[in-house]
């Protein structure tokens, strides 16, 4: 299987799907992939292109055209705080920027690249070397504006996409909503797989809590839904699983663990109404999805991440219990600045940071997390980044961030005079984290490890 991706560009595979259409829900117009091809004027050069995607049609159109170019694409969220956008742009000096949220950017000029597309082009380009294998850069932390980016090659993207199509029942007649942001690796993976085989991709730019999404759901007759745990929790709350939805064939999940009771409910719903539900496990460093649970095994192996896809394999470190993944979709390392773009590491090995076990039938289960990350609404967030942002915004002090079952952010502080509303405001303004996702605790002292560092495990146990 690995050889399938050696000579194929992801864009060329997408272009081969001549029946592929994209729906611009703002206008109701259908665009064939042939109409989108070379529809945005781009200089014939090389460099970085920042795409702040909102998953609406124009963002998709820009992305596809740059995917056909020689530019290295950096996918970021359009909702990223403007201060963080500026910091990233200053650090990486992209040649092009697409941002539907801004009308002007310092050091850039506006360029009409199509009748409906404006790009920002750097006035004084900065020359630097980018390794030819770096096709795309994705953030490891969806909302903190971290400069740490994952280097992905064309082979990473293609091998991952083809492996997912080995098990996922995508059909040429499928109608697919982009309700998972394309700037997020899971959303990008959903986009890629369906571009290769489905017929219609609906660029909603809406989440499931907006009535416009459900209007589109009925109007365009969605045949599939994808979502992080939060999406399925919301679907449960609004009563989605109480009724059949005849056009819906299958659903997929990734971006964190579903609770076992909810998994059971969805599995029973799928059995009752003849649907398929795919629970999946993945990471940005592997271009998306690495493992899945066959739908027939959901009830029997509730809580499992299943097996690796056809191109990969797992191994558990005997000393640490950490899950290690091997496959051609493993990225080429990280970039923290321009200088890091000159290299690409072909290791094929990923230390996931997750602690795992394997049962007697070979199914894998995640039992803990080694690294300092949590997933809020399916977006991986670096807890160390959040602590630094709080220190910078509030003027020093100690902030200790931990996760509560991947659903909530816990912030512990030591200042009994601090107005906790200030913390909530910083998290909302800087990171778009809703106060309902945060639990704040005051402690008069902090437990430390033997070497004088904060004992995060003990802090979490105290909450």
Image (cartoon, rainbow, N blue to C red):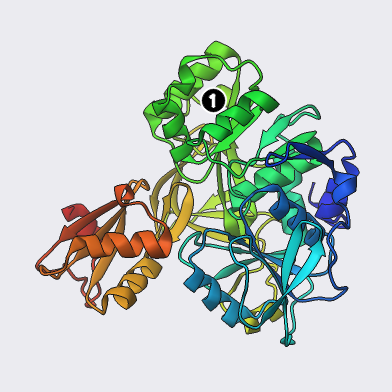
Rendered location of residue 57, percent (x, y): 71, 48
Quadrant for residue 215, please give it. Answer: top right
* In front of the other: 334 or 224: 224
Say what secondary structure mark 1 lies in.
Answer: helix
Q: Nearer the viewer, residue 69 or 254?
A: 69
Quick one: label 1, few (<14), some, or many (20+) residues within 10 Å?
few
User: Residue 250 occupies which quadrant of the picture?
Assistant: top right
List x then y, in percent, for residue 439.
Answer: 24, 52
| Residue at the spot 33% in from the left edge and 77% down from the top edge | 392
Which residue lies most toward the top here? 272
Residue 102 falls left or right of residue 256 = right
Residue identified by numbered label 1? 297
Left or right: where 420 falls relative to 206: left
Is 22 left, or right, of 186 in this rendering? right
Whether residue 303 is visible here, answered yes or no, is yes
Give coordinates of residue 140: x percent, y percent.
53, 62
Q: Is residue 301 above or below residue 396?
A: above
Nearest the eye: 288 or 205: 205
Residue 279 visible in image: no
Residue shown at 35% from the left, 61% from the top:
427
The percent coordinates of residue 343 (x first, y second) are 70, 78
């Amino acid at each position: 299987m690995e050889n399938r991706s050696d000579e194929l560009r992801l864009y060329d595979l997408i272009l081969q799907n001549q029946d592929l259409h994209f729906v611009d829900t703002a206008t109701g117009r259908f665009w064939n992939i042939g109409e989108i091809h070379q529809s945005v004027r781009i200089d014939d050069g090389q460099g970085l292109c920042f795409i702040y995607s909102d998953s609406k049609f124009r963002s998709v159109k820009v992305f596809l055209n740059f995917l056909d170019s020689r530019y290295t694409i950096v996918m970021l969220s359009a909702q990223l705080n403007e201060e963080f956008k500026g910091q990233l742009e200053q650090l990486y000096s992209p040649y092009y920027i697409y941002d539907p949220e801004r009308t002007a950017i310092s050091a850039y000029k506006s360029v009409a690249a199509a009748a409906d597309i404006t790009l920002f082009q750097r006035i004084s380009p900065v020359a630097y070397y980018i390794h030819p294998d770096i096709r795309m850069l994705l953030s490891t932390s969806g909302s903190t504006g971290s400069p740490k980016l994952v280097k992905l090659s064309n082979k990473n993207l293609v091998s991952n996409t083809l492996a997912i199509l080995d098990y996922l029942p995508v059909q040429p007649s499928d109608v697919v909503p982009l309700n998972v942001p394309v700037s997020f690796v899971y959303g990008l993976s959903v986009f890629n797989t369906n571009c290769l085989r489905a017929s219609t991709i609906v660029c909603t730019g809406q989440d499931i809590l907006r009535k416009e999404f459900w209007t589109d759901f009925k109007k365009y007759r969605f045949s599939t839904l994808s979502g992080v745990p939060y999406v399925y929790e919301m679907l449960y709350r609004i009563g989605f699983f109480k009724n059949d939805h005849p056009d819906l064939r299958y659903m997929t999940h990734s971006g964190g663990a579903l609770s076992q009771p909810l998994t059971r409910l969805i599995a029973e719903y799928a059995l009752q109404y003849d649907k398929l539900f795919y629970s999946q496990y993945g990471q940005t460093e592997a271009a998306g999805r690495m493992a899945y649970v066959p739908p027939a095994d959901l009830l029997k192996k509730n809580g499992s991440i299943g097996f690796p896809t056809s191109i990969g394999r797992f191994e558990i470190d005997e000393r640490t219990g950490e899950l290690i993944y091997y496959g051609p979709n493993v990225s080429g390392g990280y970039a923290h600045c321009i200088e890091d773009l000159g290299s690409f590491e072909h290791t094929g090995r990923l230390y996931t940071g997750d602690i795992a076990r394997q049962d007697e039938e070979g199914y894998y289960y995640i039992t803990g997390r080694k690294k300092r990350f949590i997933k809020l609404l399916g977006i991986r967030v670096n807890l160390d980044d959040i602590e630094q942002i709080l220190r910078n915004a509030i003027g020093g002090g100690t902030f200790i961030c931990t996760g509560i079952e991947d659903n909530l952010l816990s912030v512990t502080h030591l200042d009994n005079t601090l107005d906790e509303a200030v913390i909530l405001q910083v998290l909302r303004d800087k990171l778009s984290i809703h106060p309902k996702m945060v639990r704040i605790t005051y402690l008069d002292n902090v437990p430390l490890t033997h070497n004088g560092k904060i004992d995060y495990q003990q802090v979490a146990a105290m909450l």
